[in-house]
Image: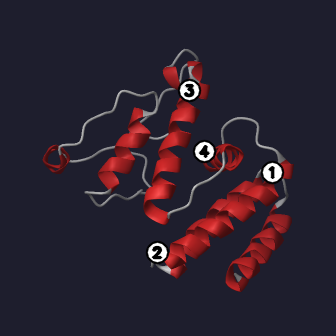
């Protein structure tokens, strides 16, 4: 889990407010990223307490669906990529690591990431940065099923496929 700290003035200047949905914070960060520079820092600045009755636990399915819709909107808007319902479900489960992630869906996830890479290149995104981000996602997905040495091999094979596309 994570928490966020930000300066109030730049936030107020954007005029962006929470939407009324379950994954409202996810949508908020997507909206804010259009107007503000954002980054993850490798420091723990707050303590996050989880409890079994929190909304993200009680309504995980609704929250995941809301995040999936946000992801789909962004893929269409930023890359012109429209995923099928099945692809969107697989992409969201691997991206957010929620639900029942299945090993047999790893090949589909790899194909989705390859499509995103090609679309990113067509939309003039930095190929080096794009490749690094997609490789990181694929490596994390492989890590759910394989020992580290096999993850390394899968990551290299994915890189070869990306460069060949």
**Whether residue 156 is visible:** yes
Which residue is label 4 attached to?
96
Of residues 159 and 20, which is closer to you in this image?
Answer: 20
C-alpha distance separating marks 3 and 1: 22 Å
Determine the secondary structure under disc 3.
Answer: helix
Which mark sits nearer the N-terminus, 2 or 3?
Answer: 3
The nearer-to-camera label among 1 and 2 is 2
Where on the picture, by quarter, is residue 36?
A: bottom left
Going 49% across and 65% down the picture, which residue do you hit?
79
Side of 150 where 33 appears, left or right: left
C-alpha distance separating marks 2 and 3: 32 Å
Side of 6 where 61 appears, left or right: right
- Circles 2 and 3: CB atoms closer than 8 Å: no
Going 56% across and 67% down the picture, which residue do you hit?
133
Which mark sits nearer the N-terminus, 2 or 4?
Answer: 4
Which mark sits nearer the N-terminus, 1 or 2?
Answer: 1
Of residues 128 and 92, which is closer to you in this image?
Answer: 92
Which residue is label 3 attached to?
62
The nearer-to-camera label among 2 and 3 is 2
**Whether residue 3 is visible:** no
C-alpha distance separating marks 2 and 4: 24 Å
Where on the picture, by quarter, is residue 108?
A: bottom right
């Amino acid at each position: 889990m994570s928490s966020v700290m930000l300066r109030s003035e730049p936030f107020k200047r954007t005029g962006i407010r929470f939407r009324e949905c379950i994954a409202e914070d996810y949508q908020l960060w997507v909206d804010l990223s259009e107007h503000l520079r954002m980054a993850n820092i490798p420091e723990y600045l707050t303590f996050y307490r989880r409890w079994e009755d929190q909304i993200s636990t009680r309504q995980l399915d609704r929250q995941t669906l809301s995040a999936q819709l946000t992801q789909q909107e962004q893929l269409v808007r930023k890359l012109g990529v429209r995923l099928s319902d099945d692809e969107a479900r697989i992409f969201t489960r691997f991206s957010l690591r929620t639900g029942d992630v299945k090993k047999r869906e790893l090949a589909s996830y790899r194909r989705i990431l390859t499509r995103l890479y090609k679309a990113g290149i067509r939309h003039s995104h930095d190929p080096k940065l794009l490749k690094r981000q997609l490789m990181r996602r694929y490596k994390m997905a492989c890590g759910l099923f394989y020992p580290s040495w096999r993850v390394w091999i899968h990551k290299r094979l994915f890189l070869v496929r990306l460069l060949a596309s």
